[in-house]
Image (tube, helix red, strand yellow):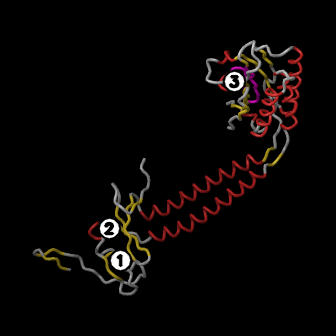
């Protein structure tokens, strides 16, 4: 869809256009739906609550974080690189390329309109983009919130493609030439040529000529702006700041992946020994006779710290109110 390429107004300067269920949870405190786990780390048991399998969650979290880091930093890198290189190609003229000038506000003479048409033709020959100019009164778009909305509707009404660049110039009424505003509306297919740098260059010059050069009529200002900026539209260049930023983003993404893998593996090892326990079992802790590590009684046949064989514990039976092993 078409979008703004910028605009301006008397006293307001130039403005640029626009280019273009419950999840996994872990906590040290109990919460609804959580399972109590004990995992062993540095020789002691640690209690934690989770609403998913703790062992699987550690692995899936690492995968998810790695995927997010790669995608996020990859997208940032791609954006920087796309903005860094400007190598435009002339558009194919496989569409209605008729240039029109509509002077509804009567601000052009016949000679000025002819001069403007020559400038628009040169721009079209250079870029393949078809430019058009329309002048209106402010009351023509009084039912719109702003001139940009009017220019958008006018573009959609007039053109059936995304290869036009429409410039709309507006004045309050027949008697006023001091107050004015203008808006550019470009099709999506023009973006590789009419980038942010190009539209800002055009917009600043046009606004400056309309504001400060009293010798030029509106048509003359628009024509001169096209003449001055047309040679720049197809220029190839590299914005090295974006290249550097893209490389930094790529390096940051690689570093993030490495750190995620390092700390993710550490987290996975931490939870390899995780067991589910009931509340009353947490306090049944013993020391390993071999390494001194602490473990929860009744859940292991070997020490979770050193792997040594643990003493066998017979099941508990209730007899006559007494507990025996």
3D distance between C-alphas at marks 2 and 3: 68 Å
Asked if residue 121 lies in the magenta stretch, the reply is no
3D distance between C-alphas at marks 2 and 1: 12 Å
Q: Secondary structure at mark 3?
A: helix
* Label 1 Cα crowd, 10 Å radius (few <14 / some 14-19 / many 20+): many
Find disc 1 in the rendering and name its residue.
Answer: 295
Q: Is residue 4 above or below residue 49?
A: above
Q: Position of residue 27 (x, y in %)?
A: 40, 60
Q: Is residue 255 above or below residue 224?
A: below
Residue situated furthest left in the rendering? 320
3D distance between C-alphas at marks 3 and 1: 74 Å
In front of the other: 15 or 324: 15
Instruction: Magenta stretch: give its range.
Output: 155-170
Find disc 3 in the rendering and name its residue.
Answer: 151
Q: Quadrant of the N terminus?
A: top right
Find disc 2 in the rendering and name its residue.
Answer: 277
Q: Quadrant of the C terminus?
A: bottom left
Q: Quadrant of residue 249?
A: bottom right
Q: Along the polypeptide, which appears first: circle 2 or circle 3?
A: 3
* Label 2 Cα crowd, 10 Å radius (few <14 / some 14-19 / many 20+): some
Q: Is residue 186 above or below residue 46?
A: above
């Amino acid at each position: 869809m078409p979008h703004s390429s910028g605009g301006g107004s008397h006293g307001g300067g130039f403005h640029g256009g626009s280019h273009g269920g419950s999840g996994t949870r872990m906590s040290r405190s109990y919460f609804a739906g959580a399972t109590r786990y004990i995992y062993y780390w540095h020789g002691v048991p640690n209690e934690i609550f989770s609403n998913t399998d703790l062992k699987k969650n550690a692995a899936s979290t690492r995968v998810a974080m790695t995927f997010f880091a790669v995608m996020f930093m990859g997208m940032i890198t791609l954006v920087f690189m796309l903005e860094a290189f400007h190598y435009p190609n002339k558009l194919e003229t496989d569409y209605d390329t008729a240039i029109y000038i509509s002077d509804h506000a009567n601000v052009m003479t016949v000679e000025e309109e002819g001069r403007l048409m020559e400038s628009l033709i040169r721009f079209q020959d250079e870029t393949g983009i078809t430019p058009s100019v329309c002048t209106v009164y402010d009351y023509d778009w009084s039912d719109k919130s702003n001139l940009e909305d009017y220019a958008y509707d006018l573009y959609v009404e007039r053109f059936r493609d995304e290869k036009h660049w429409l410039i709309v110039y507006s004045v309050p009424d027949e008697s006023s030439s001091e107050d004015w505003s203008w808006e550019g509306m470009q099709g999506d297919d023009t973006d590789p040529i009419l980038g942010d740098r190009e539209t800002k260059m055009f917009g600043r010059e046009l606004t400056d000529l309309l504001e400060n050069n009293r010798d030029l009529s509106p048509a003359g200002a628009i024509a001169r702006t096209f003449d001055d900026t047309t040679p720049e539209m197809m220029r190839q260049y590299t914005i090295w700041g974006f290249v550097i930023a893209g490389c930094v983003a790529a390096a940051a993404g690689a570093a993030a992946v490495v750190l995620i893998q390092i700390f993710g593996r550490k987290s996975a090892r931490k939870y390899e020994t995780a067991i589910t326990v009931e509340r009353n079992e947490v306090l049944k802790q013993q020391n390993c006779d071999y390494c001194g590590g602490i473990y929860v009684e009744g859940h292991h046949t070997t020490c979770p710290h050193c792997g040594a064989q643990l003493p066998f514990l017979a099941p508990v039976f209730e007899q006559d109110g007494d507990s025996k092993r």
